[in-house]
Structure formats: structure tokens, C-alpha cells
């Protein structure tokens, strides 16, 4: 039997390799798209992507995080079908809302609304993809999951290379990409997980039970997604597509810098959720597992500091190299957003640790406070400073979230002892 430390290291390595490849493709996609569409066109795409991103998180309804936790602990796949049914029903409802009321969204061109309606249909294949990858992550087959992520990240780049790219044509092509992605995910699961499809016929829990258990995580996921995409949505509605494109270009560079961190966290969460008794009956070995997780965090914080400093210093040449002179205004925004990586690292580690320990309320309070802070600061600073004000609002809100999470870690120690030590370290 492979020890948990070896399993964590192997999974983290696979995730890092795939994330770097996927992020590399995402960077290429962004560069090509900004040069094809310009700041206004890229702003339109960023708005559509933000809406679908948040909606997909809501239609998932927390079932992915819940089932990853359960599959990692019990190796039980019987609730996958229930999760898919929940996601498909919610996706259908949101598609109907978009098609009925999408034209009411202010400051959006008719082409943007049409593209949004078309791309909203991607919620259906995204539901299948989410369920399939939940199974792979739950059984900790990060090698297969990583390979799948790498393969599907190439497809959007091929799409944007096609001639005569417009926002409507792009939405149709990206919808096709999501369908192909879902098919690939199903094939990977059927080849990797023994009796994968048979487990779908042995659903052991009613939908009501799944909805009740997933609801707290769903609320947290929704708040998180709103928090992550609120600035883009508010800029698009309050100012317009050009300012949104300027902010989004800088944000994409910061997102790319999180590649290694997100890869390690994706591998770390199933390890946090796993029952220690599965590997060892000794408290010493369990403590050693937690100690290894804390060591990983220290390395991630050190890396975050180095990356933030590098992005801040090299912001101007990086923006000009990636996006061209039209996005010169993104330089100052990137210098601000670069420092979000440090509180982001702390926040993500604490949130995953709390979720693995069934402490959703602590996470909910911190996310709600930071979301409200971001909303107020955006309403205050966007009219005064435009996209740069929105960047400052995002950085301050991320620090507020860190403060609340660390306060919760110091006042109530979860089942795993790593969070309390982090509050002392910070």
C-alpha cells in the first residue's frame, strides 16, 4: 500500500504538471483573444465567461466538494447519478432565465446578449464534466484527471485560431468544446474506474438527502464565485466593456501565476478529507501527515511572495509583451492584483481545511464579510478610479477574508490540527 505522504506528493506533482500545461494554453488563448477582439471585445467575452463561471458553480450546488470528500473517505461512487440530476435540473432553470431575461442586462450589446444565450447551453455538458471529474478526484487518480485537463485545455486555443472570430461565433465554438470535453471525461472515467457505470445504477440516497447535505457547501461555493467575479460584473455594468477588458487582462496574468498553488491545493483537499485510520492507527502518523501539509503551506507562501514581487516589478513589460500597447492601462492594475497571491494562499488552505473538517459555517462568515466588503468598496472606488479602484477593492477584500479566517482558526480548532498552527505562524 502506498503511504499517504507518497500519494500526496505524487498527486501534487501530476497536478502541477497539468496545471502548468493548462495555464500555458490559457495564457495563449487569452493573448490570441485579446489581439483578435481588442479591449472592448475581450471585455464582452470576460463578462460572458464570468456569468457562466458563477452560474456553473451555483448549478453544481456543492455536490462536487461533498462527493470528493465522501469518495476519498469511503470510496463510494453511488451518489454520482443523484449529483448529475441535481446539476442538470438547475442548469435547465438557469438557461431558461438567461434566454428569458438576458436582454434586460444593462450596458451590453445585442451581440453580447446573443453570445451569452448560446454559451449558457454549455451548462449541460459542464454538469457531466463536473460529475465525471469529481469521481476521478475523489479516488485520487490525479494522473488521469491531470491528463484530461491538459488535453481539453488545448481545444479553446484551436478555436480562437480560426478566422473571422466574433463574440457570437466564439460562443458557438466554445459550446462545442464543452460538449467534446464532457465526452472525453466520460471515456476517461470508464477506462480508469472499474465498474464506473455500474455504480450509477446503485444510487443509495434520495435527491433530498443529497440536496440537504450539499446545501451548506453550495452556499459557500456561490458566495466564493460571486466574490471572484463580482468586480468584472460590476465594471461591465457600471462603466462598460473596455474597462472590463483592461481589468480582465491583468487578472488573467495573476490567475496564471496561481498555477502551482491551485495544483497543490487540488491534490491536498482529498488528502485532508481522507480518514487517517485508513492509513494508520497511530496518532503519531496522523500528526506526521498534518505536519507534512503545514510544510507544503510554508513552501506555497514563500513562492507566493516571490511571484507577487516579480509580477509587481515586471508588470509593464509583461503586459506589453502579452497583450500589446492597447492594454497599457493594465500595468498599474497588475501591480496591485499581484499582491493578492499571498492572502489567496492563506485563504485557500484554510477554506479547504475547514471544509474537510465539516466547518462550513466558519468559512461562510469569512466569505460573506469579504463579499460585502468587496461590493461596498467597488461601489465606492469604481466611480472614482475605474478599473484600478476595482483592483484595490479586490486586494483589500482578500486581506479582510484572511483576517476573518485566521480569527476563526485561532478561536475554534477544526478536527485537523493544522489550521491552529497556521494562525500562530501568520
Image (tube, grey):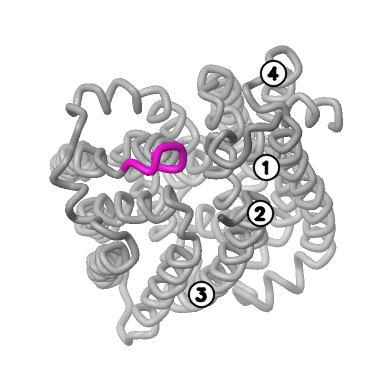
Quickly name the residue at label 2.
261
4 vs 2, front mark: 4
Q: With respect to residue 35, does 81 lie above or below?
A: above
Residue 41, horizontal then vertical, whole percent: 41, 65
Q: Quadrant of residue 7?
A: bottom right
In the rendering, at what x and y percent does residue 153 appear?
43, 71
Marker disc for residue 413: 4
Residue drawn at (61%, 45%) of the image = 386
Which numbered disc, 1 or 3, marks the residue that appears first in the sequence?
A: 3
Of the 4 image quadrants, the one containing the C terminus is: top right
Residue 177 magenta: no
Asked if disc 2 and disc 1 are in contact, CB closer than 8 Å, the reply is yes
Q: Percent from the top left, x then y, of residue 203?
A: 18, 37
**Residue 25: mark:** 3
Separation (CA) of disc 4 from disc 2: 24 Å
Mark 1 highlights which residue?
344
Circle 1: element type: helix
User: In percent of the image, x 80 and y 28: which residue is there?
Assistant: 421
Label 2 crowd (10 A; few <14 / some 14-19 / many >=20): many
Q: Main secondary structure of the magenta part?
A: helix
Residue at 76% across, 24% down: 420
| Count of marks, rendered view | 4
For marks 1 and 4, the one nearer the N-term is: 1
Residue closer to the observer: 211 or 50: 211
Say whether marks 3 and 4 touch (CB < 8 Å).
no
Classify mark 1: residues with Cα within 10 Å, few (<14), some (14-19) or many (20+). Answer: many
Distance Cα–Cα, label 2 vs label 1: 10 Å
Could you tell me how far apart the alpha carbons at marks 3 and 4 are, in whole angstroms?
40 Å
Label 4, residues with CA under 10 Å away: few <14, some 14-19, many ≥20: some
Q: Residue at x 24, y 22 (%)?
A: 209
Which contiguous range is marked in magenta?
Answer: 71-76
Amino acid at each position: 500500500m502506498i503511504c499517504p505522504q507518497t500519494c500526496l506528493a505524487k498527486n501534487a506533482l501530476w497536478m502541477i504538471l497539468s496545471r502548468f500545461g493548462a495555464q500555458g494554453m490559457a495564457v495563449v488563448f487569452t493573448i490570441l483573444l485579446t489581439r483578435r477582439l481588442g479591449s472592448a471585445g475581450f471585455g464582452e467575452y470576460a463578462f460572458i465567461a464570468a456569468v457562466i463561471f458563477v452560474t456553473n458553480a451555483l448549478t453544481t450546488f456543492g455536490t462536487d466538494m461533498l462527493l470528493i470528500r465522501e469518495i476519498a473517505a469511503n470510496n463510494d461512487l453511488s451518489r454520482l447519478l443523484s449529483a448529475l440530476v441535481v446539476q442538470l435540473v438547475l442548469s435547465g432553470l438557469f438557461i431558461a432565465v438567461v434566454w428569458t431575461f438576458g436582454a434586460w442586462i444593462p450596458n451590453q450589446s445585442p451581440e453580447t446578449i446573443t453570445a451569452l444565450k448560446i454559451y449558457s447551453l454549455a451548462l449541460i455538458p459542464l454538469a457531466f464534466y463536473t460529475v465525471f471529474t469529481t469521481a476521478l478526484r475523489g479516488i485520487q487518480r490525479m494522473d488521469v484527471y491531470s491528463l484530461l485537463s491538459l488535453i481539453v485545455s488545448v481545444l479553446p486555443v484551436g478555436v480562437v485560431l480560426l478566422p473571422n472570430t466574433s463574440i457570437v461565433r466564439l460562443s458557438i465554438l466554445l459550446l462545442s468544446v464543452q460538449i467534446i470535453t464532457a465526452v472525453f471525461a466520460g471515456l476517461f472515467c470508464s477506462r480508469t474506474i472499474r465498474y464506473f457505470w455500474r455504480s450509477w445504477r446503485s444510487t443509495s440516497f434520495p435527491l433530498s438527502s443529497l440536496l440537504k447535505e450539499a446545501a451548506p457547501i453550495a452556499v459557500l461555493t456561490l458566495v466564493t464565485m460571486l466574490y471572484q467575479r463580482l468586480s468584472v460584473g460590476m465594471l461591465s455594468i457600471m462603466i462598460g466593456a473596455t474597462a472590463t477588458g483592461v481589468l480582465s487582462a491583468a487578472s488573467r496574468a495573476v490567475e496564471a501565476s496561481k498555477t502551482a498553488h491551485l495544483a497543490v491545493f487540488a491534490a491536498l483537499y482529498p488528502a485532508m478529507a481522507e480518514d487517517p485510520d485508513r492509513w494508520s492507527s497511530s496518532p503519531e502518523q496522523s500528526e506526521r501527515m498534518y505536519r507534512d501539509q503545514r510544510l507544503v503551506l510554508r513552501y506555497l507562501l514563500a513562492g507566493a511572495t516571490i511571484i507577487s514581487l516579480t509580477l509587481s516589478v515586471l508588470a509593464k513589460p509583461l503586459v506589453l509583451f502579452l497583450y500589446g500597447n492597447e492594454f497599457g492601462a493594465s500595468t498599474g492594475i497588475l501591480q496591485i492584483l499581484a499582491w493578492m497571491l499571498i492572502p489567496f494562499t492563506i485563504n485557500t488552505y484554510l477554506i479547504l481545511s475547514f471544509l474537510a473538517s465539516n466547518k462550513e459555517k466558519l468559512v461562510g462568515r469569512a466569505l460573506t464579510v469579504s463579499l460585502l466588503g468587496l461590493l461596498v468598496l467597488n461601489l465606492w472606488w469604481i466611480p472614482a478610479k475605474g478599473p484600478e479602484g476595482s483592483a484595490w477593492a479586490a486586494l483589500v477584500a482578500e486581506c479582510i477574508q484572511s483576517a476573518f479566517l485566521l480569527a476563526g482558526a485561532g478561536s475554534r480548532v477544526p478536527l485537523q490540527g493544522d489550521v491552529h498552527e497556521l494562525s500562530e505562524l501568520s
